[in-house]
Amino acid sequence: MGIPTLISTATASNASSVDITSGIDSTYDEYMFVCTALGPATDGANFTVQFNVAAASGFNETITSTFFMATHGQVDDATTFAYVAANDQAQGTGYQILTDAIGNGSDEGAAGIFRLFAPSNTTYTTHFHSRFSGHTEDNRAADAYASGYVNATGAIDEISFKMSSGNFDGVIQMFGIA
């Protein structure tokens, strides 16, 4: 991994979304988003992402992705490791789930890292992957993985993070990787 350079920090306070509309360009081949202290207003909300190709609007690019997660119950029950078909997309245009069922209690929440590769490349699709850790609404520790690609050959220059329901608090830092 190269050296990360901090580009921007966005602090969400009861926000519906964090839309990053500048700073993603050909300067770096990789962008890393460090998401911390994610707290949804709605219990059981999913933290999600979507993209815009340059000069597009609406955060509705076509995504193909996969999602799997491991969980372990707080009282040493309900251990799982599974592919979660409901959380992936096959040429979908919805927001991609990065981690799901986040609890909204004061002792719950999520954090993780999302990586976007070569977003300015106009020859190939833009790939991404993420890993998030969270405390779910039903008292499980969760380790979630999502990866895939944006099926567009235009340059990706905007990204939107939001919960699947309601507002949220959190900090999202964008780094360029040299």
Image (cartoon, rainbow, N blue to C red):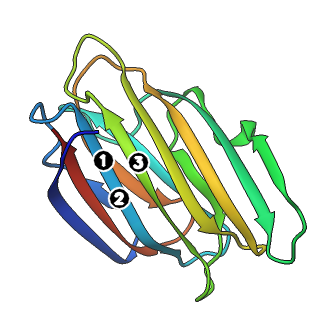
Q: Is residue 100 left or right of residue 94?
A: right
Residue 55 appears in the rendering: yes
Q: Classify 173 as above or below 42.
A: above
Would residue 164 be seen by someone viewing this image from the given angle? no
Place of residue 156 in the rendered image (x, y in percent of width and height, measured from the top left): 25, 32
Q: Is residue 97 left or right of residue 38?
A: right
Task: Answer left or right for 32 relative to 94.
Answer: left
Which amino acid, by three-letter code, is at mark 1? Answer: Met
Cβ–Cβ under 8 Å for marks 3 and 1: yes
Please report the residue visible at 50 percent of the width from the left and 33 percent of the height from the top: 93
Residue tagged 1? 32
**Image point (80%, 76%), residue name:** 74
Mark 1 surroundings within 10 Å by alpha-carbon count, few (fewer than 14), some (14 through 19), many (20 or more): many
Which numbered disc, 3 or 1, marks the residue that appears first in the sequence?
1
Residue at 52% over, 40% down: 94
What secondary structure is found at the residue carrying circle 1?
A: strand
Would you say the residues marked 2 and 1 are in contact, meaning their CB atoms lie under 8 Å apart?
A: yes
| Residue under numbered circle 3 | 114
